[in-house]
Image (tube, rainbow, N blue to C red):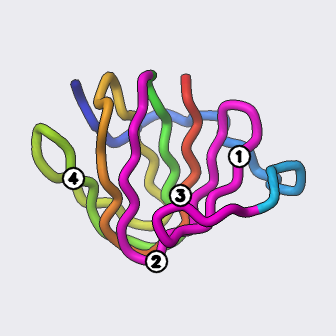
Amino acid sequence: MKLSKLTENFPFPTSFDDFSAPRTVQSCSVRTLGNATLIESGGRFKRFSASDEHILIMKGNGHFKYKRGELPFSEGEAFLAEDVEEYDFYGEGTFLIVRS
């Protein structure tokens, strides 16, 4: 179980035209396409995952909270959630998640 900052490039999607129409989940806007999820959060979002996930902070800042502690994030940073299962985003922003 590990949530860490990425030090190498990951091929995140750069176009969101083909993503689904936004739906409201936990007071956030969520759009999906295949194994990618785009979240526009107004403050807090709880995420459940059964696989590893790459996370790009497209806009905003705040921190992740998970079973092993907290980790700050800022716009432009990327992270890898390995076998975390459940974590929270605290902070307003736009987050792109790609399941491995």
Q: In this view, does 78 lie to the left or right of 71?
A: right
Q: Which amino acid does label 4 sit on?
A: Lys
The reply to whether callout 4 and callout 1 are in contact (CB within 8 Å) is no
Q: According to the image, label 1 marks what residue?
A: 32
Label 1 SS:
strand
Residue 97, percent across and down? 55, 44
Mark 3 or 2, nearer chain start: 2
Q: Which residue is drawn at 49% across and 58% down?
A: 57
Pointer 3 or 1: first along the chain: 1
Which label is found at residue 95? 3
> Which picture quadrant has residue 60?
bottom left
Label 4 sits on residue: 65
Report x, y in % for residue 70: 16, 52
| Structural distance between the alpha carbons of marks 4 and 1 | 23 Å
The first of marks 2 and 4 along the sequence is 2
Quick one: label 2 or label 1, which is nearer the N terminus? 1
Q: Name the residue under label 2.
A: 42
- Label 2 sits on what residue type? Gly
Q: Is residue 39 or residue 72 the one in the foreground?
A: 39
